[in-house]
């Protein structure tokens, strides 16, 4: 099993550009999450999904959108990138509710200039 | 909203010394999880505590959940260079089942 994979690993965006961060898991997990981690800080939840077709906002959803058309994939869309979105983005998945351990992907390091 | 704080923010120890990080929640927790993130890496799950007053051990690591289920601690005995990284607690709020990550404690080891 590859676990949770994310692409790209690194990306530099100009202000106002858009992009999609890809996340795929092969563990047949129902729950998937997107976090951002600013330098030296903890993890902030952006969006999460409890199953295909179901998504909900986390703590910091502004400026982002998600979709969950399949169990495996949970892409994160950034529209009109801003410098405040410079961060490391982690995708994670868990078998069921938040009471189960989360498996994290390797992360995408995004810089907006 | 729920806040989860960790202290200290940074800790530098000599190899072989012990290390402890403390996690405090503003609300009562149903569960608490601990993760380790190596420099440049991603968080990796270590353990979950569920019961009030629970103590669990993993080799040199000891995890405790407070009696009131509002705090937790991680203690590492005789640190090694492989222990370097940031340790995060993540609390699941008893009321709304939301998982909130703590601010993390960054551990560096002086050889």
Image (cartoon, helix red, strand yellow):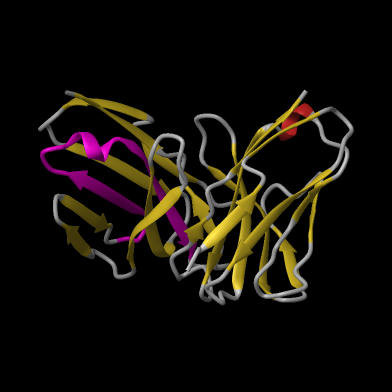
Which residue shows up at 87% across the image and 35% down it? A17
Q: How many marks?
A: 0
Q: Could you say where residue A48 lies in the image, as x and y percent from the top left?
A: 66, 62
Left or right of residue A29, residue A74 in this image: right
Q: Could you say where residue A21 lies in the image, as x and y percent from the top left?
A: 72, 49
Q: Could you say where residue A109 lies in the image, as x and y percent from the top left?
A: 62, 36
Q: Could you say where residue A13 lies in the image, as x and y percent from the top left?
A: 79, 31
* Residue A113, quarter of the rendered image: top right
Left or right of residue B4, residue B35 in this image: left
Quadrant of the snapshot with the C terminus of chain B: top left
Which residue shows up at 55% across the image and 60% down it? A4
* Residue A68, quarter of the rendered image: bottom right
* Residue B8, quarter of the rendered image: top left
Residue B84 is a magenta residue: yes
Residue A79 is a magenta residue: no
Left or right of residue B6, residue A29 in this image: right
Which residue shows up at 35% across the image and 61% down it? B69
Residue closest to the eye, A53 or A11: A11
- Point out the residue furthest to the front here: A1
Query: Is residue B92 placed above or below B18 in the rendered structure?
Result: below
Residue closest to the eye, B103 or A54: A54
The range drawn in magenta is: B68-93
Residue closest to the eye, A73 or A54: A73
């Amino acid at each position: 099993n590859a676990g949770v994979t994310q692409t790209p690993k690194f990306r530099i965006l100009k202000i106002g550009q858009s992009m999609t961060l890809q996340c795929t898991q092969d563990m047949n997990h129902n729950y998937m999450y997107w976090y951002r981690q600013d330098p030296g800080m903890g993890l902030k939840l952006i969006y999460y999904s409890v199953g295909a077709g179901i998504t909900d906002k986390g703590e910091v959803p502004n400026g982002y959108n998600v979709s969950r058309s399949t169990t495996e994939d949970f892409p994160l869309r950034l529209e009109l990138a801003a410098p405040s979105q410079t961060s490391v983005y982690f995708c994670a998945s868990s078998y069921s509710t938040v009471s189960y351990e989360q498996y994290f992907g390797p992360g995408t390091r995004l810089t907006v200039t | 909203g729920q806040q989860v704080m960790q202290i200290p923010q940074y800790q530098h120890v000599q190899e072989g010394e012990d290390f402890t990080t403390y996690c405090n929640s503003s609300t009562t927790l149903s569960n608490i999880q601990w993760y380790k993130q190596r420099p440049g890496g991603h968080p990796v799950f270590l353990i979950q505590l569920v019961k009030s007053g629970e103590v669990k051990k993993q080799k040199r690591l000891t995890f405790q959940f407070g009696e009131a289920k509002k705090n937790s601690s991680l203690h590492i005995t005789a640190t090694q260079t492989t222990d370097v990284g940031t340790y995060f607690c993540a609390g699941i709020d008893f009321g709304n089942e939301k998982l909130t990550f703590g601010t993390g404690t960054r551990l560096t080891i002086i050889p």
